[in-house]
Structures are given as C-alpha cells and as structure tokens.
Image (cartoon, rainbow, N blue to C red):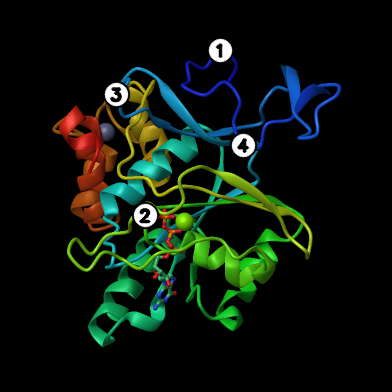
C-alpha cells in the first residue's frame, strides 16, 4: 500500500510517530513517520480522478450499512464497495439497517438480497440502529477490534455508534423529505473508543464509489464467486462477457451467479466517470 497516491497523507487509523510541541496548551504535535498500513479503505477522490482518498487505515472489519430506502442503497454500490475492500484486503460485513421501517414486501426483498450475499460468503446482519437489543451480534463482532461504519449518507452510521456507545452523542440528521437522502451530517472520519473494548471509526456518507488502479482483467478476481470459476474458462484472459466456454457465463446462465452481481460486474467493467458517482 505504500506509495499510494492519496489526497490525505495521514488517515484515521494510522499509527504514527509524533512529538508534542513544547509550550502549547492544546497538545498539538508533529508527525514524523507513519507505520506501514495493514490495509486501507479508499475511494476515488471526486475532484482529482486519479487520486485516492483514504477513508480509514488498519481496519479489522468494515461494516457496510445498507438500507433499502431512505436512502436507497443499490446493489451496484454494494458490489463496487466489495470489489474495493476485496482488493485492499479489508474484511467486510454487510449490515442491513432500519429493519423497523420495512413493510412485508420490503422484508421479502431484504431476505432475497441477504441470500445473494450469504451464498458467496459474506456475513450479513439485520438490525435497527435505534434498538440496542438488535445490535448484540454486531457488538460481538466489534469487541476488541478496530472497525468502521461505511455507507451512504443517512443510512444510520452515527445513530448506530450512539446506540452502541451512548456517551458519545454524535450528531445525526433526519433524511431530507425532498430527496429521501441523508444530509451529509458527519463531515470527517473520526475514531471513538468503545467501553467494551475496541474502537469504531464513524465516517461521512459516501455518494458513489469510484474504483482506481484495478485492471479490467483483475475485476473478476474481486467477485468471490467469479474468482472460484475463472480457472475453468477456456481463455485465461477471459473477461466473461461473450467469450466461448466461459465458466462464469455458464454459471450465470444456470442461475448459480445472481443476476444483480453479474450486472454490477458489467457496469464496473464498462466503468466511466458517469457510472462512478451514483
Ligand atoms: N427508523 C429508523 N431510523 C433510523 C435508523 N437508523 C438511523 N435512523 C435515522 O436515519 C437518520 C440518519 O441517521 P444518521 O445516523 O445521521 O446517518 P449517517 O449514516 O450517520 O449519515 P451521514 O453522517 O450524513 O453520513 C436519522 O434521522 C436517524 O434517526 C433505524 O434503524 N430506524
Ligand atoms: Mg453520520
Ligand atoms: Zn470467463
């Protein structure tokens, strides 16, 4: 990860060597050195397209918060996020939030979505960030670990931190009634210690998730269920689009690979700026 071109040289989660400045009251210091990072969560910087923004470093597990509506989290957003965390070696758990707000039909859709991701090996949790009793499984996964909450603005990241660690009282905001989206309440990533052990990084909501530095041929390596199959494709540089004897296409045709996952794959493969920031 060293030599990464990023807009922020130091990120939340970095281990640094620093010296306190003498004769100041506000404990300011000078950072001399940053320890080698175990991993990073990055996204493409919105304004400088070739640069990355490091959302957090040295994370044991990132929890991607997902809501079916208010705001909508699309499957292509989830899959883009997963490609990035697979590429940077960050363990990812999917947290389906706001289950108290869903009607019967939405709960069915939720179960279908969860089935897609559990089948390919991702841990999925369902909870309501406002009800501590629904968060026990999550808390068990956070204990004594450095973890992070990620996801669109308004999915409930700060609400969840407040429920888990009530002393913190982080600012949260209602979803905008006009756009049914969050209001970008959290504006910078911040790490908070947890009284049961460990620490959590609350992050600002991400609009879209651009991918950088991943070659077209590599993308399928970060779709777990494709990776397992690609050795069986006739061509070793197969992109799994229209090639003959493609094991991925065959698995898709037989229903083994979920339609939403294959659609996301094609979108990422045909990536352009317009697709990046949705
Ligand atoms: N009903 C219900 N509302 C929730 C739940 N989780 C969060 N909310 C509400 O959703 C709104 C947005 O929550 P925040 O915690 O501010 O969202 P955030 O992800 O931190 O958003 P940003 O800081 O903008 O990225 C608030 O009004 C919360 O009360 C939930 O599980 N159920
Ligand atoms: Mg927030
Ligand atoms: Zn193939």
Q: Earlier in the sequence, mark 4 or mark 1?
A: 1
Q: Nearer the viewer, residue 241 or 187?
A: 187
Assess disc 1: are there few (<14), some (14-19) or many (≥20) residues with their C-alpha within 10 Å of its C-alpha.
few
Please tell me whether mark 1 or mark 2 is closer to you in this view: 2
**Camera-side residue of 225 and 12:** 12
Q: Is residue 95 above or below residue 105?
A: above
| Spatial separation of the CA atoms under disc 2 and disc 3 | 29 Å
Which label lies toward us, 4 or 1? 4
The answer to whether the beta carbon of the residue marked 4 is less than 8 Å from any atom of ligand 2 is no
Cα gap from disc 1 to disc 2, whole angstroms: 30 Å
In the image, farthest residue toward the right = 22
Q: Earlier in the sequence, mark 1 or mark 2?
A: 1
Q: Secondary structure at mark 1?
A: loop
Q: CA distance from mark 4 to mark 1?
A: 17 Å
Determine the CA span between mark 4 and mark 2: 19 Å
Q: Quadrant of the C terminus?
A: top left
Dots 4 and 3: beta carbons under 8 Å? no
Lateral position of residue 98 relative to residue 21, left or right: left
Residue at position x 45%, y 62% in the image: 118
Q: Nearer the viewer, residue 224 or 156?
A: 156
**Residue 20, above or below 188:** above
Mark 2 near ligand 1 (CB under 8 Å)?
Answer: yes
Is 142 situated left or right of 253 in this image? right
């Amino acid at each position: 990860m060293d030599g990464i071109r990023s807009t922020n040289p130091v990120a939340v989660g970095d281990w640094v060597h620093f010296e306190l400045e003498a004769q100041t009251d506000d404990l300011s210091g000078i950072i001399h050195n940053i320890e080698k990072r175990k991993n990073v969560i990055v996204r493409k910087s919105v304004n400088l397209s070739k640069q990355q923004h490091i959302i957090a470093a040295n994370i044991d597990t990132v929890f991607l918060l997902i809501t079916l509506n208010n705001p909508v989290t699309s499957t292509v957003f989830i899959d883009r996020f997963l490609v990035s965390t697979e590429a940077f070696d960050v363990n990812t758990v999917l947290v389906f939030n706001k289950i108290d707000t869903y009607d019967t039909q939405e709960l069915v859709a939720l179960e279908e979505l969860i089935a897609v991701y559990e089948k390919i090996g991702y841990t999925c949790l369902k909870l309501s960030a406002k009800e501590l009793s629904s968060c026990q499984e999550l808390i068990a996964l956070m204990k004594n670990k450095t973890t992070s909450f990620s996801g669109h603005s308004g999915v409930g990241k700060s609400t969840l931190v407040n429920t888990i660690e009530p002393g913190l009282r982080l600012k949260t905001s209602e979803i905008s009634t006009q756009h049914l989206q969050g209001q970008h309440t959290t504006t910078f990533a911040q790490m908070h210690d947890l009284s049961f052990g460990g620490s959590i990084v609350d992050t600002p909501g991400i609009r879209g998730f651009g991918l950088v530095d991943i070659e077209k041929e590599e993308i399928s390596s970060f779709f777990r269920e494709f990776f397992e199959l690609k050795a069986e494709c006739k061509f070793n540089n197969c992109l799994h689009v229209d090639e003959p004897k493609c094991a991925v296409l065959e698995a898709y045709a037989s229903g083994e690979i979920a339609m939403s996952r294959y659609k996301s794959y094609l979108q990422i493969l045909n990536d352009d700026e317009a697709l990046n920031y949705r």
